[in-house]
Image (spheres, rainbow, N blue to C red):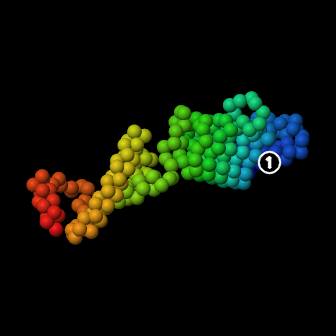
Amino acid sequence: MTCYPGVHAVIMHRFNHFLWNLGLKWLARWFSHFTRWMTGIEIHPGARIGHRFFIDHGMGVVIGETAEIGDDCTLYHGVTLGGTTWNAGKRHPTLLNNVVVGAGAKVLGPITLSEGVRIGSNAVVTKSVEKNSTVVGVPGRVIHHHDDLQKKRHAMAQKLGFDAYGATRDAPDPVATAINKMLDHIHAMDEKMEIMCGALKQFGAEIDVNNLPDLGSCTIATSAEVSDDVEKIESN
């Protein structure tokens, strides 16, 4: 309560926002300016901020007049929620619940960061982001998104015996992208194989798919072995 500027800035903003809504805009701006001098955090008194908002470290944080922040959001130092125009009306970002913005990131314009979005350090975001996405880079790009495709990747990664999210977290972007494409391809091939096995079983072929070899000890069948298998299936 005595030595954390992020807490001081939020408490003062609650008071300044109250004054702003009463129409005492000059007084609200004056206290806002005083708070910036004391904490290094500039929050316009017109900004609307939800519950349990947390600013870590805080130096250099700027939050514009028409910014809207939901519940349980976190900003790190150097973050800017800024505008891209002088026109009246909505000019600053909207952050829904559970958004985290990393140090030095810039979120600009009347865009929306949906629930659960994570913005990487020093990213520059100028477009709206769907929920539960992770954004990095300049300009900001989505590198991780919790959708049906991502769920399939995660399931296939578990089936193959490694963690796709761990690869995405630890590997450079090109490597993670290549791994994700491989998982997509393997998933598609796996589905086709299941369809083929089902079709063959309808013709009476008995195919054991439960004892698949480990990936580390896979062997490549010769053409003669493949021909023998095909003849057995045809004869059945």
Q: Amino acid at mark 1?
A: Arg
In the figure, is residue 177 to the left or right of 4? left
Residue at 69% x, 50% y is 70
Q: Secondary structure at mark 1?
A: helix
- Corner quadrant of residue 24: top right
Vertical comparison of 36 with 202: above or below: above
- Whether residue 168 is visible, yes or no, is yes
199 or 33, nearer to the observer: 199
Of 23 and 61, nearer the camera is 23
Q: Is residue 200 left or right of residue 222?
A: right
The residue drawn where x is 80% and y is 35% is 33
Tell whether 236 sits left or right of 176: left
Q: Which residue carries the number 1 mark?
A: 14
User: Residue at point 77% right, 48% down?
Assistant: 11
Q: Quadrant of residue 58?
A: top right
Query: In the rendering, at what x and y percent does residue 163 appear?
Result: 39, 54
